[in-house]
């Protein structure tokens, strides 16, 4: 007989399913069933999960309409009604999901938490109705919806009616999209079939718990169908992240604070979109007239704009934003490392930061694709822009790229389509958009993040239709003519201000931004707060109209 702790009904010793080492049961329970040795995340029941994530004493069960119990009068080796009763007795749950209204670190939330122990967390009429009712409660109360998934797929014993729950729940999430209500999925192990192919993957943000697996078909089904050995890491959280299918992978202890940061961002717009009054007086020494800027050698300016010591997007996030949470992936094909983005708080105000990401050494530059976005990168940026629009968050973009990635894979992936889509999206985004050219502004790869209400530039930034080298090769047919091309392109901040392409210049420290990245970041931060104070209270329709007028007049005599 296994010894059991009488206070918690936990076995005194258990064997970790990951490393097979013996683990003291009570310590394992207190560690949220995460092995101290190998880090394996054992499965949690719905009640344990609610206790882990939500504020104690706040969950209140939500009701749902009665559903058909055994619509097919199904029997395999046992009647379906018998299987249901056994699941209820074994888990103490009425169904495979628990739905509650509660708070998480003081933020109101609706939570729907699945339990794999109840018939494999399968999606049937009762589960579909409960998820839909939870979404409708979130809609009526304008509370964010957090869904914790654990499922083997649709419930076969309910036939086509189980299948219909996929469309039913997807429709419920579409209503939350239309209403601007945040939805978050926490993918736990395992999440497959009809759940993965409906509400689990339709959320605004998808976080996968470490060790989780997710896919449409399970690995045994796939291996049996194709008759091949599956690759290592198949359908794991880490593989999903690399494939651009989830926003992040979190250890169990990280889930609660990660969710709290997202809920806080969603609450800002709901509470009135107030910005600090101090921002009005926070105007930095912005330069708005070309004559106030010194004339610089264009080719030397290009060299300064490209200096690898200049702050990158993630450096600015670290300097300027609190609780920055990077979000990953285009939900289609990959997570482009050349473009980074996520939500953080700028002086208490949540913003969506998106920017090109280069690097400070050769290894990082290569890993980041030299900041040259791929189609997946621009689609990721578009996804984050749409999320900002849905939640009412200001968008800040940081431009620093030689240009969009050029190559066979980029062309096959629809590079032109991805860039064009961003231009159209930004032209209609109903939230303030501020772009800062922090280094190189190269061609369409730069403009894809810079259709903004206000476009600022650092003093040594450049912005052009093509690189000087490219221009020299095409028009002079001599790459050595790049310095001459740089002058002819009129790409310095002074030139751009005179053309009206940028609205103001943020002076750099002596010697360039790379000489004092922290001071540079502070100046950019002050420029952003002053600019956002001007834009934050504008009517969304007026913002869009003014933004379109701004770009409509370019090139007109």
Image (tube, rainbow, N blue to C red):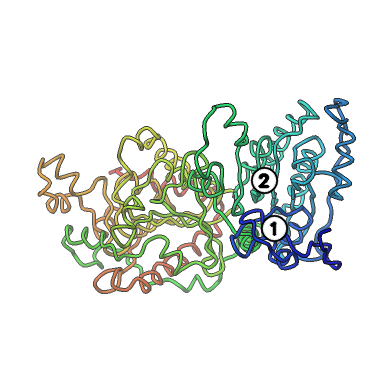
Residue indicated by mark 2: 179
So how many labels did they put on this image?
Answer: 2
Residue density around tag 2, few if under 14, some if 14–19, many if 20 or more, within 10 Å: some
Left or right of residue 329: residue 417? left
Residue indicated by mark 1: 15
Q: Position of residue 65 (x, y in %)?
A: 87, 40
| Alpha carbon distance from label 2 to label 1 | 47 Å
**Occupied quadrant, residue 57:** bottom right
Classify the position of the N terminus by image quarter: bottom right
Residue drawn at the location 25% of the way across and 60% of the way down:
494
Q: Position of residue 17 (x, y in %)?
A: 66, 53
Seen in the picture, residue 53 relative to 373 is either above or below; the reply is below
Residue density around tag 1, few if under 14, some if 14–19, many if 20 or more, within 10 Å: few
Classify the position of the C terminus by image quarter: top left
Residue drawn at the location 50% of the way across and 59% of the way down:
535
Closer to the camera in the image, 393 or 127: 127
Seen in the picture, residue 96 relative to 52 is either above or below; the reply is above
Tell me the tag on residue 191: none
Closer to the camera in the image, 462 or 123: 123
Report the mark closest to the observer, 2 or 1: 1
């Amino acid at each position: 007989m296994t010894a059991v702790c009488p206070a918690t009904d936990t076995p005194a010793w258990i064997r970790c399913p990951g490393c097979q080492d013996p683990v003291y049961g009570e310590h394992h329970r207190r560690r949220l069933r995460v092995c101290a040795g190998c880090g394996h995340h054992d499965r949690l029941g719905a009640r344990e999960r609610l206790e882990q994530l939500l504020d104690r004493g706040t969950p209140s069960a939500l009701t749902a309409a009665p559903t058909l119990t055994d619509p097919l009068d199904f029997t395999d080796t046992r009647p379906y009604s018998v299987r249901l009763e056994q699941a209820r007795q074994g888990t103490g749950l009425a169904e495979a999901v628990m739905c509650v209204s509660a708070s998480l670190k003081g933020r109101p939330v609706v939570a729907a938490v699945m339990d794999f122990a109840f018939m494999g967390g399968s999606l049937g009429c009762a589960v579909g109705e409960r998820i839909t009712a939870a979404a409708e409660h979130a809609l009526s109360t304008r509370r964010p919806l957090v869904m914790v998934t654990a499922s083997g797929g649709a419930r076969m014993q309910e036939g086509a009616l189980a299948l219909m729950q996929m469309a039913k729940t997807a429709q419920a999430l579409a209503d939350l999209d239309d209403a601007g209500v945040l939805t978050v999925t926490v993918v736990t192990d395992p999440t497959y079939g009809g759940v993965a192919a409906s509400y689990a993957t339709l959320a605004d943000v998808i976080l996968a718990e470490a060790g989780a697996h997710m896919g449409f078909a399970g690995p045994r089904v796939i291996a049996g169908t194709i008759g091949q050995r599956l690759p290592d890491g198949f359908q794991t959280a880490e593989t999903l992240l690399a494939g651009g299918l989830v926003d992040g992978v979190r250890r169990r202890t990280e889930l609660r604070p990660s969710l709290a940061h997202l809920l806080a961002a969603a609450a800002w717009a709901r509470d009135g979109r107030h910005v600090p009054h101090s921002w009005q007086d926070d105007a930095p020494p912005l330069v708005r007239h070309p004559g106030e800027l010194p004339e610089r050698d264009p080719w030397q300016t290009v060299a300064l704009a490209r200096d690898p010591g200049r702050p990158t997007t993630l450096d600015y996030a670290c300097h300027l934003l609190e609780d920055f949470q990077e979000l990953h992936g285009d939900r289609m094909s990959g997570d482009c490392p050349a473009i980074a983005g996520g939500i953080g708080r700028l002086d208490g105000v949540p913003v969506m930061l998106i920017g090109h990401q280069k690097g400070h050494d050769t290894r990082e530059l290569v890993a980041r694709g030299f900041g040259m976005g791929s189609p997946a990168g621009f689609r990721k940026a578009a996804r984050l822009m749409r999320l900002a629009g849905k939640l009412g968050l200001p968008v800040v973009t940081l431009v620093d790229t030689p240009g969009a990635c050029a190559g066979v894979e980029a062309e096959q992936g629809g590079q032109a389509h991805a860039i064009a889509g961003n231009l159209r999206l930004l032209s209609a985004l109903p939230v303030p958009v501020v772009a800062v050219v922090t280094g190189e502004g190269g061609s369409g790869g730069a403009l894809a993040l810079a259709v903004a209400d206000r476009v600022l530039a650092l003093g040594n930034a450049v912005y052009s239709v093509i690189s000087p080298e490219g221009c020299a090769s095409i028009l002079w047919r001599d790459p050595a003519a790049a310095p001459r091309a740089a002058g002819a392109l009129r790409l310095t901040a002074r030139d751009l201000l005179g053309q009206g392409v940028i609205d103001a210049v943020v002076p750099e420290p002596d010697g360039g931004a790379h000489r004092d990245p922290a001071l540079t970041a502070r100046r950019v931060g002050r420029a952003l707060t002053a600019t956002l104070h001007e834009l934050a209270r504008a009517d969304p329709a007026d913002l869009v109209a003014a933004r379109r007028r701004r770009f409509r007049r370019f090139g007109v005599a």
